[in-house]
Image (cartoon, rainbow, N blue to C red):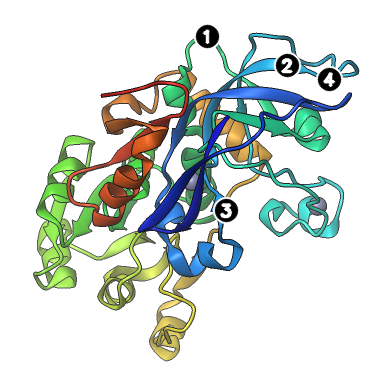
């Protein structure tokens, strides 16, 4: 089978490796669709494990099953989480699934024709796709689950003003989700194309980040935002987040600057204004279940976010498009198709 080894964003190599055979407790799935995630192109985050096969946003079909697997059958359409928390440790019991201290195995990457699913993920990380969720839509389950988690932790609710800074794929999902909750959504970005997308996908107000953003926000909204969700990693975006939150409000760090960047937090000001900063990293099983419901019910439409589809051979171009970020939203790789 073919797999795509990622060395860095400019060096992705397609290699031929033996197609694995599932052991008694494993299964083999054929990858039909796999999304390129914004986090896949973050080199400081991925390089320590390179070369690696990336791809954690999958829609797949079960094609071979170990003899003691009875939960799934040939032909089943599935989403599989990239890793599964134990559900029993201190962190899991407190809802901090991404901090589980007992994650043993990761799902091999989806930028490959097939994935060998380890026992633990067959047991607890595999989700049957309902009829209404297509393979392409399945690639949104994980990113939407992360968005669901962040908005839950930030306590986003009806009638709040929610400001989204950064309107890439995640920012746009945040806009869509906040709209389903009855929020007024203000979107900011430096990229005009992304602002157009933000408007098309539900933002009530868009602000070009080249302007004085906090001032524009007050002109447009009458006051600052109740919740600010940072979906960009530039220093200027962080400063805007600090400056756009209202008294008593919440800033959710969904994206962060690189690890060696120092960020200055105006703690004294935040203390007096009772501002909360929360972080949200990845997602947990309840978030995945909720994301699936949102997609299945059509409450969150994801099809309109798909801008490109490529065969595995063209994955390097896909990464280039996502890194560039100007004309693409969701780029999906179809490892078993040849797309011209
Ligand atoms: Zn992702
Ligand atoms: Zn745990």
Answer with the quarter of the image where residue 41 lies.
bottom left
Q: Nearer the viewer, residue 102 or 109?
A: 109
Answer with the quarter of the image where residue 223 lies.
bottom left
Question: According to the image, label 4 marks what residue?
Answer: 66
For the residues marked 4 and 2, what is the alpha-carbon distance in whole angstroms?
Answer: 7 Å
Disc assigned to residue 131: 1
172 relative to 39 in the view: left or right: left
Q: Is residue 249 above or below residue 297?
A: below
Q: Nearer the viewer, residue 11 or 228?
A: 11
Q: Helix, strand, or loop for circle 3?
A: strand
Task: First in sequence, mark 3 or 2: give its number.
Answer: 3
Q: In x, y percent, where is residue 35?
A: 43, 37
Q: Helix, strand, or loop for circle 1?
A: loop
User: CB under 8 Å between callouts 1 and 2?
Assistant: no
Mark 3 packing: few (<14 Cα in 10 Å), some, or many (20+)?
A: some
Disc assigned to residue 52: 3
Q: Helix, strand, or loop for circle 4?
A: loop
Residue for point 16% across, 69% down: 213
Task: First in sequence, mark 1 or 4: give its number.
Answer: 4
Residue for point 35% across, 68% down: 233
Residue for point 81% across, 51% down: 104
Mark 4 packing: few (<14 Cα in 10 Å), some, or many (20+)?
A: some
Q: In x, y percent, where is residue 120?
A: 81, 37
Camera-near label (1 vs 2) is 2
Q: Helix, strand, or loop for circle 2?
A: strand
Mark 2 packing: few (<14 Cα in 10 Å), some, or many (20+)?
A: some
The answer to whether the beta carbon of the residue marked 3 is less than 8 Å from any atom of ligand 1 is no
Residue for point 26% across, 52% down: 167
Disc assigned to residue 64: 2
């Amino acid at each position: 089978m073919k797999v795509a080894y990622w060395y860095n964003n400019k060096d992705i190599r397609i290699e031929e490796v033996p197609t694995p055979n599932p052991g008694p407790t494993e299964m083999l799935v054929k990858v039909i669709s796999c999304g390129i995630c914004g986090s896949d192109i973050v080199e400081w985050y991925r390089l320590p494990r390179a070369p690696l096969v990336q791809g954690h946003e999958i829609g797949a079909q079960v094609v071979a099953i170990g003899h003691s697997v009875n939960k799934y059958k040939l032909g089943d359409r599935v989403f599989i989480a990239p890793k599964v928390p134990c559900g029993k440790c201190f962190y899991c019991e407190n809802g901090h699934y991404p901090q589980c201290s007992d994650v043993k195995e990761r799902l091999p990457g989806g930028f490959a024709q097939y994935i060998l699913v380890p026992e633990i993920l067959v047991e607890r990380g595999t989700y049957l796709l309902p009829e209404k969720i297509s393979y392409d839509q399945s690639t949104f389950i994980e990113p939407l689950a992360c968005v669901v988690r962040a908005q839950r932790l930030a306590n986003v609710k009806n009638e709040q003003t929610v400001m989204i800074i950064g309107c890439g794929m995640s920012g746009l999902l945040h806009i869509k989700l906040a709209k389903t909750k009855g929020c007024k959504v203000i979107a900011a970005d430096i990229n005009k194309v992304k602002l157009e997308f933000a408007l098309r996908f539900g933002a009530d107000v868009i602000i070009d980040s080249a302007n004085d953003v906090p001032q524009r926000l007050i002109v447009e909204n009458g006051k600052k935002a109740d919740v600010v969700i940072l979906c960009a990693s530039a220093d200027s975006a962080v400063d805007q987040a600090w400056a756009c939150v209202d008294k008593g409000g919440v800033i959710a760090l969904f994206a962060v600057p690189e690890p060696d960047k120092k960020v200055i937090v105006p703690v004294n000001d935040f203390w007096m204004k009772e501002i909360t900063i929360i972080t949200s990293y990845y997602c947990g099983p309840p978030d995945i279940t909720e994301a699936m419901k949102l997609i299945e019910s059509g409450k969150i439409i994801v099809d309109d976010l798909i801008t490109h589809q490529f065969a595995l051979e063209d994955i390097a171009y896909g990464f280039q498009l996502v890194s560039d970020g100007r004309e693409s939203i969701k780029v999906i790789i179809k490892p078993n198709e040849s797309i011209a």
